[in-house]
Amino acid sequence: MQHGLKKGERIEQEWKLKGYLELLSEYEAEKTLDLNTRILEFNPEYYTLWNDRRRMDLQLEKELLFTFKCLLTNPKSYWVWNHRRWIVQQLQNWNQELDLVSKMLLKDARNFHGWDYRRWVVKEGKIEGEFEYTTQKINENFSNFSAWHYRSKLMPHQPDVAEQIEHDFEMVRNAIYTEPGDQSAWLYQRWLLGKPKESILCLDAGCAINQDQMTICILVNHTCQLKTASLHVILDHVPVEVEFKTHQRLLMAKTRKAHHVQIEILQGHILAKRQGLVSPKTVISGSCDQLQIHTCDPIPETSDNVQPKEIWQREYESIKELSELEPDSKWPHLALVHVQEHLGKKQEAIETLKRLIEVDPTHAQYYNDRLVSHRLEQRLHKGKIDLSGKKIASLQDLDILSLCQEIDLSNNRLQSLRYIEGWQAKHLNLSNNQIRDLTGIQSLNLESLDLSNNNLTFKDCQPLLHLKLRLNLSGNLLTD
């Protein structure tokens, strides 16, 4: 039984379905244009029939009308829009199509199928004047994200890009002061500011020795990957072949024990995932318990579209003023954090993140994780660090802890130890969390581990069976 439908409506739907199935059966026997049309009127998502239709004897003008009727009832059907492209490519009626899609976008300004189709018509028909069209649509509705996005695609083709960008900053300010709680203009402002390209830098390095084996760990400033697995490593003045693996921002390799270590990283050897950033030439050397990092010829921080510092500073002052006028609005504070981080105002970013936790409690855990990461970067070291009671729910962004020897993560919200592989901690306190998954713990060379007062059963503790360490499992279930 279909809930929410009256008996008469249910019977009508059953009859329609029965008729549709009968049409499909007829179509299998005889593929005619009439049957094809009747089936697609009922179900325009049947893409095989659209393919069949293109092999039939069609009158293109009538076909345009048919797709228009389909779009009126199904304006977000990929297959109808795709079939219409096929027709228009033959008719070349670009201006007529532009008028049609303009009317469609009046009906639904957020129909991304319509926007995508409009971009295609403009490109294929070599039509001009679209930048003015986006201005019109944005002025009609500052919340029209599709219009802002389309504008960003058209911007590089404007005659004076720098002047137009400056004008658009003013346009954005008008929008965000009018509707500070809407994300569309804020996202466009972030695009206008640009994203600086920077180097992948080695932040820290260390070695953990376990009997005759040594684990080398290198911490970098971005989630990364290696161009080739092998780095140039010299152990006690003898070159050796060592293969590194990457985990988030960590590079790790296991090799034989040595007193002196030297690692050479060539320019571009380390790559950042999704950002196109590369490493400068870097040399890491020293005794295994005290490695030094020397960066040679740093790659300058540049980007094709990033705005100069004075523009970021101007936008910072404007956003800060608006965040004070709208203390309970999420988007001004999010934008403020982004600009503060770029300008190096780390302490201010921390205070803004604290405010975001209050303003936007739905995403409080995300803001808290970023807050913890900021605090860690302010006091990076290899000794003891206390992060107890910080409401931490994941280790994903805490790879900066990988070289710390003693870590207290008690009284948090951890449920698993995912991302812990490669940490060099000797003493780890994970008491009073909600941990059920210990995957990765066996990769650590721990001397003591406190897992008291979690939710562990005997089965969950299997990864601990062969570890030699001081272990506290009190206050757990330890039953299956």
Image (cartoon, rainbow, N blue to C red):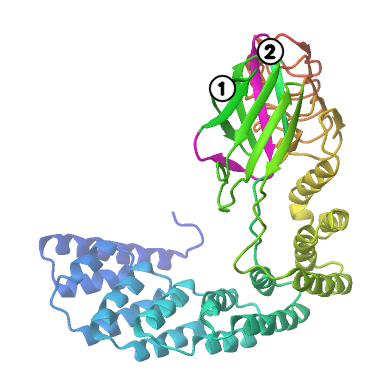
Quadrant of the rendered image containing residue 295 = top right
Which span of residues is magenta-colored?
A: 210-228
Residue 28 appears in the figure: yes
User: Residue 155 in the image: x percent, y percent?
Assistant: 55, 79
Quadrant of the rendered image containing residue 315 = bottom right
Q: Earlier in the sequence, mark 2 or mark 1?
A: 2
The secondary structure making up most of the magenta span is strand
User: Residue 231 in the image: x percent, y percent?
Assistant: 56, 31
Between residue 241 and residue 434, name the one nearer to us: 241
Between residue 111 and residue 469, name the one nearer to us: 469
Is 169 on the left or on the right of 95, as rendered?
right
Residue 81 versus residue 376 in the image, above or below: below
Residue 226 falls within the magenta-colored stretch: yes
Quarter that holds the N terminus: bottom left
Badge 1 marks a residue whose secondary structure is strand
Residue 98 falls within the magenta-colored stretch: no
User: Residue 416 in the image: x percent, y percent?
Assistant: 68, 31
Rounded to the nearest whole Å, what is the CA distance between mark 2 and mark 1? 21 Å
Residue to which mark 2 is pinned: 210
* Mark identifier at residue 239: 1
Residue 295 versus residue 321 in the image, above or below: above
Residue type indicated by callout 2? Asn
Please tell me whether mark 2 or mark 1 is closer to you in this view: 1
User: Residue 391 in the image: x percent, y percent?
Assistant: 81, 40
Residue type indicated by callout 1? Pro
Residue 203 appears in the figure: no
* Mark identifier at residue 82: none
